[in-house]
Amino acid sequence: MTTNRTFTMLKPDSVEKGHIGAILEKINAAGFRIVAMKLTQMSTRDAETFYAIHKERPFFNDLVTYMTRGPIVAAILEKENAVEDFRTLIGATNPADAAEGTIRKLYAASIGENAVHGSDSDENAAIEGAFHFSGREMF
Ligand code: RTP
Ligand code: MG
């Protein structure tokens, strides 16, 4: 295993419900180092660009509305095997299918409003991190 990076967002529902601290505690306890972090809000154009891969999917408009309705916490995280281990930590896309103890099992309401994002590859982690952070915001 090599040390690498992933990108996450604590989505608007997590911020609205006051779950930032609890989710960051889980991330910390799992051994991720915070490389970059901020509270920010995505514009419609940002969300359409970020989730462009899903633009033909039936849930795309709902996804853009959801992701732009309030602030998110965006962060870059570092750990051995970061992308895969973070996907394990957050659990399945649909919280009904997520393993016990995962972030989505604990904090997500539904497949549409599922608390957190995690990059699905090293390549996308780099693209998504650069979408939200400049080099001088990464530590
Ligand atoms: P993410 O990209 O946010 O980490 O989530 P994921 O890989 O687990 O799931 P993905 O297939 O990439 O879907 C992106 C986000 O779209 C919303 N979604 N809604 N209503 C639905 O059927 C549905 N399916 C997906 C979720 O917010 C999902 O995380
Ligand atoms: Mg995804």
Image: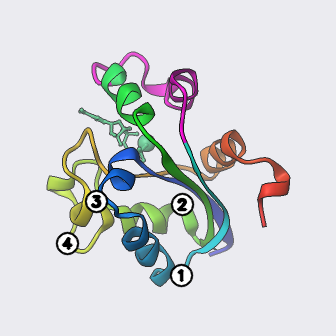
Observer able to see residue 119: no
Residue reaching furthest to the left? 96
At label 3, counting other C-alpha atoms closer than 10 Å, the crowd grade (few under 14, some 14-19, many 20 or more) is: many
Give, as a three-letter code, the residue at label 1: Gly
Q: CA distance from mark 4 to mark 3?
A: 9 Å
User: Which residue is pictured at 29% across the width and 69% down the height?
Assistant: 102
Q: Nearer the viewer, mark 2 or mark 4?
A: 4
Q: CA distance from mark 4 to mark 1?
A: 19 Å
User: What residue would you read off at disc 3?
Assistant: 104
Q: CA distance from mark 3 to mark 2?
A: 16 Å
Depth check, front residue: 120 or 17 = 17
- Determine if the C-beta at disc 1 is less than 8 A from ligand 1: no
Q: Quadrant of the C terminus?
A: bottom right
Q: Position of residue 130 (x, y in %)?
A: 72, 44
User: What residue would you read off at disc 4?
Assistant: 100
For marks 3 and 2, the one nearer the N-term is: 2
Residue reaching furthest to the top? 56
Give, as a three-letter code, the residue at label 3: Arg
For marks 2 and 4, the one nearer the N-term is: 2
User: What residue would you read off at disc 2?
Assistant: 83
- Is there a contact, CB below 8 Å, between mark 3 and mark 1? no
- Is there a contact, CB below 8 Å, between mark 4 and mark 1? no
Q: Determine which of the numbered discs, if any, sits on residue 31 in the image.
A: 1
For marks 4 and 1, the one nearer the N-term is: 1
- Which residues are drawn in magenta? 41-59
Q: Nearer the viewer, mark 4 or mark 3?
A: 3
Q: Position of residue 41 (x, y in %)?
A: 54, 39
Q: Position of residue 47 (x, y in %)?
A: 51, 29
